[in-house]
Image (spheres, helix red, strand yellow):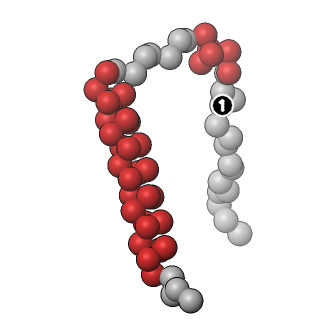
Amino acid sequence: MPAFTFEKISPPARRATATSAVPKKPRSVISQMIDRIAERRARRALLDERAVRRDDKPRD
């Protein structure tokens, strides 16, 4: 028989009101520029991938 047992202790409940009262910090100009560049790259890669797939299909 074990001499001791472990009890599971649940973490304290989070308070939603405290986090909603703090306004979000606006994103910096640099991070906005990086987001725009990344979005354009993703679109271009998607278009290139579609073009490659279209070229791979056998034509009848």
Residue under numbered circle 1: 12
Secondary structure, mark 1, is loop
Please name the amino acid that badge 1 sits on.
Pro
Q: Residues within 10 Å of mark 1 (few under 14, many from 20)?
A: few
* Residue 7 percent across, percent down from the top left: 68, 49
> In this rendering, is residue 2 above or below 6?
below
Of all residues, the one furthest to the front in this rendering is 60
> Which quadrant is home to the N terminus?
bottom right
> In this rendering, is residue 49 above or below 60?
above
* Residue 54 percent across, percent down from the top left: 49, 73
Where residue 22 sits, quadrant-wise, is top right
> In this rendering, is residue 48 above or below 34?
below
Q: Residue at x 67, y 43 (%)?
A: 9
> In this rendering, is residue 40 above or below 1?
above
* Residue 2 percent across, percent down from the top left: 67, 65
* Residue 16 percent across, percent down from the top left: 68, 21
Q: Residue at x 68, y 48 (%)?
A: 8
Q: Is residue 26 left or right of residue 5?
A: left
Q: Residue at x 47, y 66 (%)?
A: 50
Q: Residue at x 53, y 12 (%)?
A: 23
| Nearer-the-camera pick, 23 or 52 | 52
Q: Is residue 36 left or right of residue 2?
A: left
> Which quadrant is home to the C terminus?
bottom right
| Nearer-the-camera pick, 10 or 38 | 38
Q: Is residue 57 left or right of residue 2?
A: left
